[in-house]
């Protein structure tokens, strides 16, 4: 795990953030990838928590968009594990659910996530959330 924590200080964090998008819905992954790459960001996608953790072990990410409800390892559990592997990552949770996932959202925030975007959200809301987290 120690070698995973390649220094983020060597990369221009604000200008070229490496972004990971984790969602079990291909349409969401593809939308994020298309929109964020259009803005000049490097984007990697993962279909579930297990794949996300594999990617994070290979390289650190600056920002991670993480779905809350996924098969296998859920978002909050993935969020907690990311905090141990890639603690510098800024995590934004995403969900298509409402009040029924309030506990999971709270668990994720306690584990280090910055905020939660609720589907459906606009492209501008996505970009605003990214900009806000990059300023922190």
Image (tube, rainbow, N blue to C red):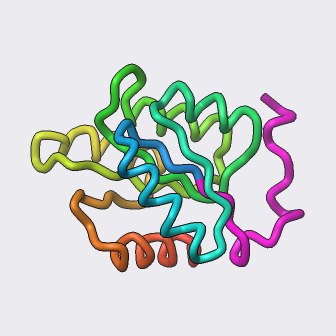
55 in magenta: no
Query: How many numbered marks are there?
Result: 0
Q: Is residue 112 left or right of residue 72?
A: right
> Percent x, y for residue 49?
48, 30
- Which residue is found at the position 76% from the left and 35% from the top? 58
Foreground of the two, 63 or 33 = 33
Foreground of the two, 101 or 33 = 33
Check the picture and name the quadrant holding the N terminus: top right
Say which quarter of the image contains residue 52: top right
> Percent x, y for residue 18?
68, 59
> Percent x, y for residue 28?
37, 51
Q: Is residue 73 above or below residue 43?
A: above
Q: Is residue 1 above or below residue 36?
A: above
Q: Is residue 75 left or right of residue 6?
A: left
14 in magenta: yes
Q: Is residue 115 left or right of residue 121?
A: right
- Which residue is found at the position 24% from the left and 58% from the top? 118
- Which residue is found at the position 73% from the left and 69% from the top? 13
Check the picture and name the quadrant holding the C terminus: bottom right
The residue at the far left in this view is 99
The residue at the far top in this view is 72
Say which quarter of the image contains residue 84: top right
Q: Is residue 100 left or right of residue 129?
A: left
> Percent x, y for residue 77?
42, 30
Give the magenta range: 1-19
Foreground of the two, 46 or 15 = 46
Say which quarter of the image contains residue 92: bottom left
- Which residue is found at the position 39% from the left and 70% from the top? 126
């Amino acid at each position: 795990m120690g070698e995973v924590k390649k220094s983020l200080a060597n990369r221009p964090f604000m200008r070229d953030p490496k972004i990971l998008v984790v969602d079990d819905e291909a349409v969401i992954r593809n939308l994020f990838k298309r929109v964020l790459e259009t803005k000049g960001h490097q984007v990697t996608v993962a279909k579930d928590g297990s794949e996300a953790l594999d990617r994070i072990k290979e390289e650190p990410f600056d920002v991670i968009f993480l779905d809350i409800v996924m098969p296998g390892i859920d978002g909050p559990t993935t969020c907690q594990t990311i905090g141990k592997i890639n603690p510098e990552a800024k995590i934004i949770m995403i969900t298509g659910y409402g009040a029924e996932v309030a506990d999971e959202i709270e668990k994720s925030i306690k584990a280090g996530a910055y905020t939660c975007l609720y589907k459906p959200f606009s492209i501008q809301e996505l970009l605003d959330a990214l900009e806000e987290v990059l300023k922190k």
